[in-house]
Structures are given as structure tokens and as C-alpha cells.
Amino acid sequence: MSTPKQLTAEELKYIDGFCKKKDVCYIDLRIELVDHLAEMVLAYQEKHPNTSFHDAFHGVYKSFGIFGFMDIAAQHENQMRKRYWREIWQYTKSCITPPRVLLTLSASVGIYYLADALEATRMPLFFLGLALFLLSITLTIKQFLNNKKALGDEQTVLMAGASRGGGFTIFSYLLLYIPLQGFWVNPGQTNNLELITHPIYLSIFLVATSIFGLANYYLQEKAKEQLQEIKAKMA
Amino acid sequence: MKNKKYIKGFLEDIVLHLINEQDEMYGYEITKKVQNLTKGAIAVSEGALYPILHKLENEKKLTATFKKVDGRTRKYYTITPEGGKTVASSSTELIDFFSGMQQIFNLKPVVK
């Protein structure tokens, strides 16, 4: 009995490159598509033994319709976005332990009283929060670029989510953009200045900024682990 | 029956049921299994299958592992206890559903 025909490493590389070209950027989805297409090509060649790999491959790709992998990739991204938010929620939930809640509340109350005591000189506290916020963004981007350098241009959803996820937008928009917008638009208007230097705002801003920085750090590390795990299994 | 409108509503149950029957399955294997079991009457497209697999994985009804097979990496899906519970409850629901359909359409087996 002859052994069933298998695709060569070059042929598999061709399929992988083809999927990449078709914007299937997530490694886990690409692994599945490469395997599926390889099986389809082999089945096609079994039926039509004289067909070359290229003809067989482009023949089976046609069965994915005119949009090719577009729909599968879009739905995968949608599912993975949900997963990204679930990870964030799970991380947040895991942080809600009595000592951590106590620490957060103490930090919030401490900052509140400090801001209240400072009264006329609260602005430095706001700039400290702003510095922390910018620092956490800078560190996240730096961490992402380091991961990318170490792991190549492969992406997992967590990695993509942690780098371009809505977290930045929502967080910065809610905590920073809205109060500051009025301030920058009309600097003479001191109401906005009062808002961003209000003890309650400052305590929320400083504590949330720190939590946000930690959450993003955690997500990046988890993304790196996930990708290394997949790559190890591929080796 | 290759009509997508019928398959769509049942695909999640079909996938869970098939994976539950075996230890583990991969995407292409599921499409072939459906095709073989139904003698080609039901065709599951890749465009419909993979989003369902990822959704079930996301909902923790399936877990996935990667294995090296024939020089390429393959993603295998296994049922979780949560997925097992869904299979059990959907089986009862499907029996009730098909018995209802039977009443409506008065379906008779086709003798060929």
C-alpha cells in the first residue's frame, strides 16, 4: 500500500504566504486555514492526479467564493474582540479581592485628602496623573514593539487588542479628553480647570490610571505567552 | 438539502454533537464527517464552520490544542463539560423540535 501524498514544506509555505496576503493576520486562524486548504488540495489531487499543486490550490480557493477569506477573517476578529474584552473583565474581576479593594479605596481616599489639603496647588497632582497616563501608554507601546521584535509580525488577538484595543480610547476619552477639551477650547474658562483639579476627579484619575497601566501590562504579557505557546507547538 | 437557511440554525448543535462523539476533531474533518454521514445532503462551508468553532471556543464550550501533523500544525477541538451540558440539553430540544415539525409537515421517509 502506497503512503498517501503529502504537501511539501514549500507548498505549505506558499499557502501560508497566500493567506497572509489575503489579510489573515491572526496566527491561530491562519494555522486552521492552511491545514484546511492543504487537506482540500490533497483531496482534489486524489480525484485529479495530474493536476499540479498550483492549479489544485487555486481551484479549491475558488470554492471560498468571491470574497475569499474575508468573511471568515472578519468574523474571527469579531469573536476575538469579544474575547479581548472578556479577558479585561476577568482580569478586573480577579483584581476585586478584599486587600486590593481596600488598597484602591485607601489610595483614592488618601489622594482625595491630599488634594483637598493642597487646595490652591492641586495642578501638580493632575500633571502627575497625566504623566502616569502617558507613561503607561509609552510603556505599553514599548512593550508591544519589543514583543513584536522578539516574536515577528505574527499576531494573536490579545496582542492586537492590547495594542490597538478600545481601552485606550475609552479611558482617555472619559477621563482626560472630555474635561480637558473645554479647558483647551476656552482656557479662560476656569470651570474646566476646577473640574480636573477637583479632589474626587484627581483621586479617580490617579487610581484608574495606575490600574489601567497594570491591566495593559498584564494583557501584553498574556498575549506574548499565548503567541509563544502557539509558536512552540508549530515548531 | 444544501440550503443554507436550514443548516444555519443547527450548525452549532451539529458541531458540538460531532465533537462530543469523538475525542477531538479538526475543521476539515468536521466538514467531511457531515458530508459522509448525510451522503452529501448537507454541506458545511468553511465560511460557516470556522466562525461557529471560534464562537464555541470563546464561550468555553470547546477547547483547542495545536498538534503537528504531516508537517503542518493542526488545531484540534475538544468538548468541555460546559459544551457537554449544551449537547445534552439541545438533544432533548431537537427531539421535541423535530417531533413538532413532523406534526406540521407530516413527513414520511423517502423510499428510493
Image: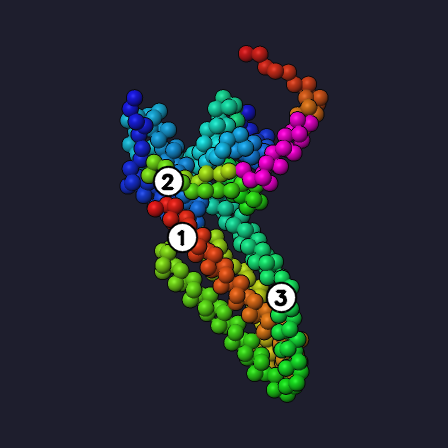
Q: Position of residue A28 (x, y in %)?
A: 44, 46
Q: Is residue B61 above or below residue A143?
A: above
Q: How is the image coloured?
A: rainbow
> Reading the chain from its start, which is encountered first: label 1 or label 3?
3
Q: Which residue is mark 3?
A: A99
The chain ID associated with circle 3 is A
Q: Position of residue B15 (x, y in %)?
A: 54, 34
Identify the amino acid type marked 2.
Lys
- Same chain assignment for discs 1 and 3: yes
> Is B86 a magenta residue?
yes
Q: Position of residue A103 (x, y in %)?
A: 62, 70
The chain ID associated with circle 1 is A
Q: Which residue is mark 1?
A: A228
Evaluate whether residue A86 shows in this view: yes
Identify the amino acid type marked 3.
Pro
Q: Which residues are magenta?
A: B79-96
Q: Is residue B24 above or below residue A18?
A: above
What residue lies at 39% left-to-right and 32% top-to-bottom?
A40
Residue A166 location, quadrant: bottom right
Q: Position of residue B23 (x, y in %)?
A: 49, 33
Element type where label 2 sits in the image: strand
Q: Give neighbour class at mark 3: few <14, some 14-19, many 20+ (Cα, 10 Å).
A: few
Element type where label 3 sits in the image: helix
